[in-house]
Image (spheres, rainbow, N blue to C red):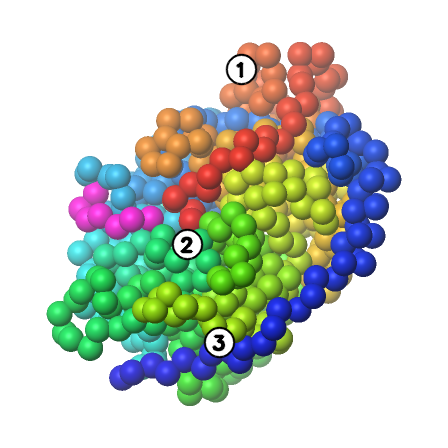
Amino acid sequence: MTTTLRRPSRTRPRAVPLLATTLLVLLGLLLTGSGTANAQFAVPPFIGANDIELQVLTEATQDPTAIDVAADGRVVFVERKGAVKVILPSGDVVTAGRLPTAANECDDCPDDLNEGGLHGLLLSPDFDVDNTIYLYYSVPGSQGVAPYPPKHPDAGGTQALEGINRLSSFVLGDDNVLDLDSEEIVFENAVEWLECCHYGGDLDLMPDGTLVISNADDTNPFESSGYAPIDERRNPSDVFDRDTHREAFDAQRTSANKADRRGKVLRINLDGSIPDGSVPGVVANPFVDDPDADPAVWAMGFRSDYRIAVHQQTGTVYVGNVGPDASNANAQRGPAGHDELDVVPPGGGTNHGWPYCIADNQPYIDYDFETGTSGEPFDCSGYTEPALYYSPTLSTQWPQLRAGGRTSMTGVVYDYAGDGALALPDRLQQKLLWFEWSRNMIFSIPVEADGSLDTFVTSVQHESALSPRHPHDAAIGPDGAVYLVEYGTGFWNNGNSRISRIACSGCQPETVSAPTQYVVGATAPAPVPATTDRTPLVASSALVVVAGIALGLRRKQVVR
């Protein structure tokens, strides 16, 4: 069935709100801080930067992608090539098993898929009883296989050219062995098998017990000059011709198409069924009664929503949305590339504009890839603007982001009510920990009572005491620490990844927690002995505050 996509009408670009920008610039000039982003903009001051620290648990990792923490203190993390590993409370690291998957640069994987692999992990909310974990991975040998549940008839893509990204449940026993034979398929998404990129794969629980999944646009970004990939050329022949059949280069077929699951945040029940309003206290998905939409869609219009986070008090979803590569605006194509921090409010149903608009709803130009001619700008009215957006250059709104490469990722909302030994200071309660992956920076952003974000310039605080190696995923442990995946500095098979945790500065773990191997910023790695005492240690003069790095690195292909 041929899909007819309803494209927005064209209009002229809106004028930039110069007054608001000017006021923010003036505010930046008035602020004082420990340093400046450049001679023009001052970085907002930050009090309390030394009250947290980064404690490294293990470097026995390779391309770790996702993490979760059990109530008994076990830290479970997964790696891109399919390994499932557990850090025991003793500090020992065991490999629970390896899930066969399709991944790039993986000689012993059964199949190859650029940006494929094992990217999603979630422990069951009843993990201490049922030992169930959920994994999201690329299925080897699945090209040409239809996903379950079946695609909507108006979804984009050609089945013969697609494979499967799968969500399955498994049993991870008390013996820390992954039972591969226990797999139960929960949900599947189609994925282009011959073209890269953007697959998403993050998993997060909602307050009502439903599950949200990030699922990116699955569109090749490399042949649209860093602007909107809207190549509408098609070849009606049954014989695939990459030069004339450009479906995989058109994000309209996915992100802009509510019948397709890609370029979306999806919401399902843990058994794979769709929330339809029949269960008390569980609202229906916004498009569940729309025959023209896939019922799993919760929000749409995303490019590369690799990592998401959920506010457990409201059900608000925060989306790190990685933007395209264009360094500069082009009158014939559209705006420069921007990354976004998007907010999906309770109830979902929002459209965030990709591939027609980006940043503060700046429109792309309707470009004809066949003739190389430009039409009118798209109309961005009605799309949900991001809470925060930025380009490679210095932001006038948020100068503390500095400049450099871009990879927006969300970590976790710190909403911890326990009294664990490693709990973060009160100033971080109800704060979203947001990651700038390429710049090796972590920011805290206040979450309002309704789930919205306070992104005023002085509210977005750079946690400069932390110096992560590309922060990738996070989870709150029972001890109050935030457990962190640091992907490392390589593209694939990098050798300096690690698992760490953010804890109150100088605090020592209880015996239920894995011992710290060393504290980042110390003059030399040194073990921190386990103890039940939560009294902070006297800060050593050997500890240094390591500023966030802004090296201008190109975004790594693994999260493009």
Q: First in sequence: mark 3 or mark 1?
A: 3
* Quadrant housing the N terminus: bottom left
Task: State the image quarter where residue 76 is shown.
Answer: top left
Residue at image point 81% right, 58% down: 19
User: Which residue matches tag 2?
Assistant: 225
Where residue 405 sits in the image (x, y, percent)?
Answer: 52, 40
Amino acid found under the numbered disc labelled 3: Pro
In the image, residue 501 sits, relative to residue 240, either above or below, namely above
Q: Alpha-carbon distance for marks 1 and 2? A: 44 Å
Task: State the image quarter where residue 148 is shown.
Answer: bottom left
User: Which residue matches tag 3?
Assistant: 275
Task: State the image quarter where residue 447 is shown.
Answer: bottom right
Residue at image point 42% right, 75% down: 257
- Near mark 1 (Cα within 10 A), the count class, few <14, some 14-19 or many ≥20, is few
Where residue 211 sits in the image (x, y, percent)?
Answer: 48, 63
Q: First in sequence: mark 1 or mark 2?
A: 2
**Element at label 2:** loop
User: Which residue matches tag 1?
Assistant: 525
Can residue 138 be seen by looking at this rendering? yes
Nearest to the eye among marks 1 and 2: give it.
2
Nearest to the eye among marks 2 and 3: give it.
2
Amino acid found under the numbered disc labelled 1: Pro
**Element at label 1:** loop
Amino acid found under the numbered disc labelled 2: Ser
In the image, residue 74 sits, relative to residue 205, either above or below, namely above
In the image, residue 3 sits, relative to residue 211, either above or below, namely below
Where residue 342 sits in the image (x, y, percent)?
Answer: 60, 59
Contact? badges 1 and 2 (CB < 8 Å): no
Tell whether position 114 is magenta: yes
Contact? badges 3 and 1 (CB < 8 Å): no
